[in-house]
Image (cartoon, rainbow, N blue to C red):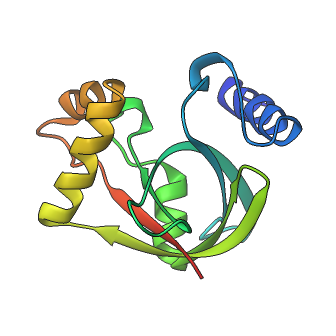
Amino acid sequence: MSEALDRNAKVIAEFRENEGRVGGDFEGAPLVLVHHRGRKSGQEHVSPMMYLPHDTEPGTVYVFASKAGAPTDPDWYRNLTAAGEGTVERGTATYRVTVRELTGAARDRIYAEQARRYPGFAEYERKTAGIRTIPVLELRQA
């Protein structure tokens, strides 16, 4: 198992053992587990990721395909956008979601708010400047 997969497996186990709360790098941060199917393999994957809650819709969250500022998009982003749906574990709740990619001013507004709350996201955006725009996905409870 790769180091990243091993780290994710530990975060997923801790999330499930502690009703959605984890320590380490994610301590105190809002975290969801997003289930998605490989667009080629059809295999189910689970990816832990930070989110920004929607202001008025409790079943809607925004996730950020930052890949810690890497020059390429993460696989989970390509899987979710290809499928248009997935499943979210949030706290003790699990629910199906539809996927919509935000663009333009809506994307910029949501990303700026995440970067304001969690400055690491501003650093990720600096790393990708001129290479790619970090996608923002809206995951809305189906």
Total count of labels: 0
Q: Report the front residue among 98 and 60.
A: 60
Q: Residue furthest top?
A: 24
Horizontal relation, residue 70 to residue 108: left or right: right
Image location of residue 56, percent across then percent down: 41, 66
Q: Residue furthest bottom?
A: 142
Image location of residue 59, percent across then percent down: 56, 68
Q: Is residue 131 positioned above or below 25 on the image?
A: below
Q: Residue furthest front?
A: 56
Horizontal relation, residue 67 to residue 13: left or right: left
Q: Residue furthest right?
A: 17
The C terminus lies in quadrant? bottom right
Horizontal relation, residue 137 to residue 129: left or right: right
Quarter of the image for residue 4 reads: top right
Image location of residue 93, percent across then percent down: 76, 60
Which residue is drawn at the image coordinates 46% and 70% (left, top)?
57
The N terminus lies in quadrant? top right
Image location of residue 105, percent across then percent down: 12, 62
Q: Report the front residue among 33 and 21.
A: 21
Q: Is residue 129 positioned above or below 65 on the image?
A: above
Which residue is drawn at the image coordinates 55% and 39% (left, top)?
30
Q: Report the front residue among 138 and 4.
A: 138
Which residue is drawn at the image coordinates 83% and 35% (left, top)?
18
Q: Is residue 49 positioned above or below 136 on the image?
A: above
